[in-house]
Structure formats: C-alpha cells, structure tokens
Image (spheres, coloured by chain):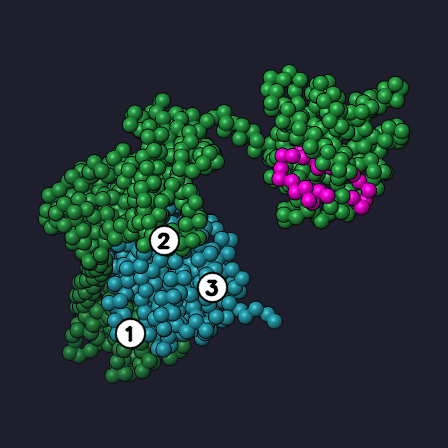
Amino acid sequence: MPDGLPTEIDLTRPSAARVYDYFLGGAHNFEIDRQLAEQIASMTPNLAATMRSGREFLRRAVRVLLDAGIDQFLDIGSGIPTVGNVHEVAQGVNPKARVVYVDIDPVAVAHSRELLAGNELTGVIHADLREPERILAETRQLGLIDFSRPMGILLAGVVHFIPDADGPEAILATLRAAAAPGSFLVVSHSTFEDQPQEMLDAQRLSARTATEITLRSRAQVTGFFGDWTVLEPGVVHMPLWRPDSPSEVDEHPERFGAFGGVARYDQPAG
Amino acid sequence: MAAVPDSAGVDAGRDPAGVDAGRDPAGVVAGRADAQGYAADWARAVRRLGFVPLSVAETERLLLAHTIRLAQAVRAEPFTAHPAEEIGRALVEAHLTEPQALEWTLHALGATFGRRVLCDGERPADLAERIAAVQGGLAAGFARALRDRTFSQQERIARSAWQARDEVEQALRESEERFRAVFTGAAIGIGIAGVDGRIIDVNQAFADMLGYSIEELREINVAALFHADDAAGMWELYQELIEGKHDAARVEKRYHRKDGTVVWTDLAVSLIRHDGRPRFTVAMIEDITERYELQQRLRFQALHDPLTGLPNRTLFFETLGRVLDTADAGQRVGVCFLDLDGFKAINDSLGHDLGDRLLVMIGRRLAACVADHGHLVARMGGDEFVILVDGGDDTDDPVAVAEAALAAVAAPVHVGEHQLAVSASVGIVQCPASETTASELMKAADTTLYWAKAAGRGRWAVYDPERGARDIARSALVAGLPAALERGEFVLHYQPIVSLLEGTMLAVEALVRWEHPELGLIGPDRFIGLAEETGLIVRLGEWVLRQACEDAERWWREFPDARLVVSVNLAARQADEPAIVDTVADALQTSGLPAELLQLELTESAVMGSAGEPLRSLHRLAALGVRLAVDDFGTGYSNLAYLRRLPIHCLKLAGPFVEGIRADGTDVAADHRDERIVDALVRLAHALELWVTAEAVETGVQAERLRALRCDTGQGRYFGAPASADVITARLRGGALA
Ligand SMILES: C[S@@+](CC[C@H](N)C(=O)[O-])C[C@H]1O[C@@H](n2cnc3c(N)ncnc32)[C@H](O)[C@@H]1O
C-alpha cells in the first residue's frame, strides 16, 4: 500500500468518483453517493450538466489526439469508467491504443481493474496526483507506455482537487518533463471566471460536502500547459472546445464553470 | 472530428447498431427520407436531455438505425413487438438511459412516428394498436435492460468496494503480521506497558533476558523492575515520561533476573500517545552485559597499573578529586608520596625484570599495610607510589601511615636469588580538604619527597609551608631571571680593594645586584646559584663583564693615575665556555679598557675546570694581558703544584681565615692557628710571586694584623661596603683631591 493513500475504505462516506458516475447515469454508486449527488444537484443544478460536458470534452479531446496519431494515454484522475471511457474511445479508433488509468480512489481503482481485466493494453494505478514521480515510475513499470514516443497526458476534472499549497504547477511541470516531443496534454478545470455570484456561493457550499475544489482563472489553467503549444481554440469554456457541431454548443457555455484546453509539446526550435 | 454523417449514413452494412435493415430494402427506401429527420430530432433530444458518450454523428447514425427498424417492425406481418423490446435494450446498452430521454422516445413514437416515418401506403390499419404495442415493448425492453444493468453495476461496484476494502485490510493484516513477526522474532527485547505500569505484552527476547516467562511478565508492574541500585534519577525519568514530559528516554539499566543474576541492558523507552495523551510505553532492551563487563574491564585497565594491579595515577587523581569535592568542612586530607631510594641502580645492575618484580612486591606490601584503613595506594609511575589518607579520625595520621609504609618497604625483599635491602623516602602533606586542590597537594608532596631525599634516605619529611613558600619563591626567581636580564633589572655595585700598606684603593670587585620590581634589591647569594643551575650565568656573566669594563674604562679616563683595576667574577660554567676568551677580548675592545686594568676572579674549582685539569683558556686569557685571581682560596682542594705553573696573579683568601683573626681573643688558640695559616699562605703566595688579597676584613685590628702578616690588599666592610659606581667615582675624586 503506497503511503499517502487511504489505509481504510469507509463505505459510509461518499466518493467523488462514484458521485461522478451517478451524474453520468451510472449505477456504480451507493445510497450515500446518490444522496450527496442529489444534494449537490439541488444546490448547483448545472453540476450534472457540467460533468457531462466535461466527459464530452474529454471524448472530443481524445479524438483529436487520436487523429494526431497518439496511441498511448496516461489518464490521471480517471474515475470509475462508467461510459465513454478513454480506452473505449481510443481503442474504438485504434485497437492497439494503450491506456493507463490512475486514480486516488481505491474503489474506483478496484472497479477499473475488474472492468479492464483481460484488456492487455490497459493498466490501472492507485496513486495520488500529488506524487507525479511515483505515477511516472509505476507507469514505466507497467511497460505499456513508451516514454520515448509521444503520448497523451489527460488531466480531466482532477487538477482542481489539488490546492495551491500542494503546488499544482510543479506537479504539471514534472509530468510535462517526462513526455517526449509531440506529446499532448489535456486539462479541464473548474473556474470562477464568468460565473454568477449565486453559482460561486453554491460551489463554496458544495465544497463543504464533497471534496474541496480550487477554482482557478483562465490564466492559471493556461499556465498549466507551460511552454507547450496550446491548440486552437485555446483555453475556453468546455463546450466551446471543438464542438461536434455548432448546434451542440450550449447557449451559455460558461454555465458549466470549467475551462478545457489541449497543448502539444513541440520540439524546441534549433 | 471523426464522424460527419455521409449520405449513406444508414447503409445497412455499416450500421453501427447492427440492425439488419437489408431484409426489407423497399421499406428502408420508403422510410428513409422521413426516418432521417425523425432520427435527427431523436438524437438532438437525447443529447440535450442526458449524457451520451457518443459524438453527434454517431448518435444520429445509431438512432436512425433504430428508427428504421421500428418502422419495419410496425409494418411487419405478422406483427410482433419483439424488435421494439430489442431496441429498448439497445438504447440502454448505448447508455441512453436518461429517463427524460425515454419519455421523449415513447412520446414521439405515439405522437409523430407514424406520420413522419411511415409513408401513407405503408400504414397498417391497426397502426394505433401496433404503435402502442411497440411503445410497450420498447419500454419493457428498456426497463428490463436498465434493471439488469443496474443490478450488474451495483454488483460490480459493491464487489469493487469490497475488493478495495479487502486489499486495504489485507495490506493492513500483512503489515500487522510483519510487525508481529518483528515483535516476536526480534533479538532485541520489546515490551509494551500501559501508563499505569501494567505490562501488556512482551516478546520472547524480553522474557528471556529477564529470565521470566512471557506470562509471568504480563503479571508484573513496571515499577517492580526498578531497583534501589538503579542510576540516580531513572525512576524520576520514567515518571516524567509517562506524564508526557518526554517522548523517549535511553539509559543503561541493570535488571535483576528471576534467578537473582544481573543483566545489564541498553534500555530505550518511547511514549506512545493517542490523541496527544500518553497511552503506552514501549521499552526496547538489548542485553549489553558482555559489553558492560568489557567496559568495566577496560575501565579497570584504564585506571590500574598493569604491573602491580594497583590504581594508577588517573584513578588516584579521580579519587583525590572526589574526596576533595565531597569532603566535610574541616576534614583533613593527607597524601604520602613514596619513592624507592636508588631504584635506578637496582634496575641497572639487576635488570628490569628483577626491578619489575621488586616493584610488584613493594606494591603488594604497601597495599597490605594500609588495607585495614582502606587507604588508596596508587602507583604513579616508575618507583613512585602514593597513599591517599582521606579519613578524618586519629588513626589516619599520615605520619603513622608513612612510617608503616617505610617499615613495610624496609623488610628484606627476596627477588629471585637476590635478597635486597630497599629503602624509600616519603613526602607527607596533610591539610584541610577545603584549603587545597589536587594539583597543589601533589606539588607539595613532590617537594616534600625531594626534601626527604635531600635529608638522607629511608626517612619521611612533612611538608612545611614556609619552606615550601621559599622554594616556590626561589623557583619564581629562577623563572624571572631571563626576563630580568632582558629588561635591564641588574645593576653592578663595586667593593673597594685597598692597599694594606698605603691605604689607597687599587681595585674594585664588581658585584651584581637585581633590582627586582616587586622584591626590591636582591643580593647575588639569592640568585647567582640559580643562574648557575639554569645556565643563565653565562649571559648574566657576560653582561657583568661588559658593564664592569665600561665603568672601569670611565674611571681610567677620568682618573688615569689611579689605575683602578676592576675585578670581575667568572663562574665555573662561564669559564668553561669555549668562547670566553673571545668574549673577554671583545669586552676590552668595545670598552677600550686596558687589559691590565681587568682582573678575573675564578674559584679554585673553576680554575681546575670540569675535566679535572686546569682550564685551557687560562693561558689564553692571561695572554690577553688581564690579571687572574683565585677566589675563595683555601676553601677548595688546591693543587699547589699547579698553581705554580698557572698564569695566576693573585690569591684572594677566603673569608673564614680572616674571620679567625679576631682582636677580642676569645679563643686565643684558634686565632693563633688561623693566623699561622694566613701567614703560611701569604708566604706561599709570595714565593710563587702572587699577590694576596684578604676578604671580609671587618675591623681595623684585622687590617692591622693582616698588614703585619704582609698581606698585600684587603677587602671588606672596613674598607668600604659594595656601592654604586657613582660612589666609587666620588671616592676616586676625593682620593684624587686628597
Ligand atoms: C471528476 S472525476 C474525473 C473523471 C474523468 N477524468 C473525467 O473527466 O471524466 C475526478 C476523479 O479524480 C480523482 N481524484 C481526485 N483527487 C485525486 C488525486 N489527488 N489524485 C488522483 N486522482 C484524484 C477522483 O477520485 C475522481 O475519480
């Protein structure tokens, strides 16, 4: 059991991963998770939509990466693979694509293992994003991802769980530093920008019940990409990031309260 | 983006939903145009109402296939709602499970499906019934599938949760097992006790070390393991620990095993807190008995003399220090410092082996003779032993101890074939403990031992503070001499040497004085001996010589007719220096004094030199033209035969002969004898063509007698006490005037 990870499983407490699953229509959750989900939903009616929108953003982003030829993915904060999982999306396009899932939630990890048993091209790691070196080391050990080739690092809806005190910039920098040129970084992150006050209040309230979330500005989120090249259309409200069709875009894309963006590591000139 | 719907989007072969539309191409063609629009609306609705893990195009393609299949089902003969059930199930499998989306689907089936998707000619007569049956079938299939999926997901998440919990528990169990294995199997003893001292658990090693069984120890309270002979403060330390004032403590502790034997341990105790409150103590003990005993042995070795087994000087000083530190007010402390007489000779003649055996015997005897009183006997090194007499009562008289020790030493010693008679000298010091320090005490003992030796062998001496103080002052003077010379603290006084015949001052003897900054003017008797011992006499003597030459040169220049000779003492050590001739020559040259106005006085022993034959330099000194006088003539062993052959000019008769010539005649016979000796000496000198100067002439009568005995010159208080150069100058001036 790695240090820093939970040493006991308390099923009487809700888990972010299972609440998220519930919002996506899954049944991988318990009463306690559903209660919390309903509570959150009643306070922030947009939240369910936000989560769906986040999942859709992830799907679109993975597709873009696949189109760019990426065939190996490191998905950190992967959650419970309810529907539209990265490996489903990826292997649907490229059956040889490899995916390593990482999550801090032991139940999510156990579930992923069970679900992925028999899928040789996927792996699951129980680890904390706050220990990027350990994540990288264990990923290397799995042998699924070739670090000398481009890969996709996916941090969807997880960096906002890292408070400033834990140094998210440094964590991101460590992860970026491990990637070969041509790699992509996908980030979606909750924000306070463009949010009505009631929404922020509600968010603060929900923070009390669920895992604490740190809302960040567009500039901060952009900063997570470091010197990598941010792809068009930049760091934007999630629905605005390369929608399937213009009609898909919500009238108020900002209402989901989260930015999404994708960047590529271009070989330094010279 | 990947999936842009193409015109052949519902091409049966590529239908992602796997609906076999090819069986009825007519219907497909017929329904296609309308079906497309219906499916697009359907897709939009489900994407709006719930989460769909597909792209827009994928969703549309999927729902178009379902639309077509539903249309086929409605038209099929015989009619069955079965395909609708499958579509309901397929919707769930595609994760289109949002209740509102189902509501939209069923509603649209009833409201617009027939109109939009079926061409006019295709509508069966019982369309409404069939639509209702399709709605029912789809709902049933959907519900069944959703129930199945929910069950399986619930089951899976529960399984995952249990598995995760199992893994964590397994890990905990394993780590517990590991710790238990460490606990039980550790070679180090581990014990856990509550803060009330009750022992909760110990491992086998702990039990073994203390010689109890684990069960027996579980009955015991920690307090029972403490003993009166534990190091001071150990119990208090434990109390403070369980009060939470410390988190850990480490001590060397002795435990009494069940069988009464003792085990020495290195004990480390740590406090375990719960929510900040002290709950347990964990003790870890390591058996260090062997190490401890080795340490003790090493300590014994470090503190004892390997030859005699007696305490060594380190232990002696440790003990003395402790006695002095802890002595009661007024308690006296004594030491007897004993040194064998002539041990070096024994060692040299009989060999070190016998010498060592002698020391062992002596050590044993000394230890035995004071054993009753419990005095400490230590060997300080070589043949030096010391007895510490630290008790306050009368039997602890250090003199009695010293006498007992001397008697013990004096009994004949048989070493090998030899029977040796050995003696020793003892220096005794005793004083109130509060008034001394270890080093002072031992310094005094050392001094006293030296006195005892100097007084003759086989005896003791008791420290005399006054004598000690003198000795100390003396050594302080010795220490101060070089600096005094540097700082010019020496001055010369001159004592006239006067013609007994004419009464004129013919010469002056230069006598050195020390103007000590604290002690005032010090006479040569107090420091010349020291200067000779330390060798400083060579430098001091040279200074005297040069200074005297300068003064004499001045007198010669000012009073050339007086031809005043300056007489300077040359110490034996100085005269022995090879450079002495050069030094004298240089002093003459530098000052400009004619050589014949310088007289050098040497004692008889200096003349004879250290080699037992007359000094080689004498002839060379004489060759410079200086006069040579033998000082204190008659006190040493004078070889008259040599005198004859040496370039000596003058004899100075020693004071005692002159003293013997007294006027009061209390001892007429003795006077007479001295007078006859002086007479003989003067005759002898004159026979050798030497001048004779009588020293210590105190009275006119003495002067008269000496003149009668034809002594040439006299010196002494009667002719003038030693005085500064200025006084001599004044006298010369007066004499010149006179
Ligand atoms: C909102 S879900 C995101 C799931 C998925 N990435 C997506 O975007 O659809 C967040 C997941 O991050 C995980 N998570 C939260 N903090 C984490 C951390 N410090 N390290 C790793 N995973 C973490 C949670 O357990 C949860 O499963």
Residue under label 3: A176
- Residue B625 inside the magenta-drawn segment: yes
Residue under label 2: B354
Q: In the picture, residue B88 is in which quadrant?
A: bottom left
Q: B128 or A19, which is in the foreground?
A: A19
Using the rendered image, report if marks 3 and 2 lie on a common chain: no
Query: Would you say the residues marked 2 and 1 are in contact, meaning their CB atoms lie under 8 Å apart?
Result: no
Viewer-side label of 3, 2: 2
User: In the rendered view of the protein, which quadrant contains the C terminus of chain A?
Assistant: bottom right
The amino acid on which the numbered mark 3 sits, given as a three-letter code, is Arg
Q: Chain of mark 1?
A: A
Q: B288 or B393, which is in the foreground?
A: B393
Q: Chain of mark 3?
A: A
The amino acid on which the numbered mark 2 sits, given as a three-letter code, is Leu
Residue B476, x across and y down, in percent: 58, 32
Label 3 CA crowd tier, 10 Å (few <14, some 14–19, many 20+): many
Rendered shade, chain B: green
Ligand 1 sits in quadrant: bottom left
Q: In the picture, residue B231 is in which quadrant?
A: top left
Label 2 CA crowd tier, 10 Å (few <14, some 14–19, many 20+): some
Viewer-side label of 1, 3: 3
SS at circle 2: helix
Query: Would you say the residues marked 3 and 2 are in contact, meaning their CB atoms lie under 8 Å apart?
Result: no
Q: B39 or B323, which is in the foreground?
A: B323
Q: Which residues are magenta?
A: B622-644
Relative to B213, say whether B469 is above or below. Answer: above
For residue A262, say whether it is visible: no
CA–CA distance in space, label 2 to label 1 = 94 Å
Viewer-side label of 2, 1: 2
User: In the rendered view of the protein, which quadrant contains the N terminus of chain A?
Assistant: bottom left
- Residue B598 inside the magenta-drawn segment: no
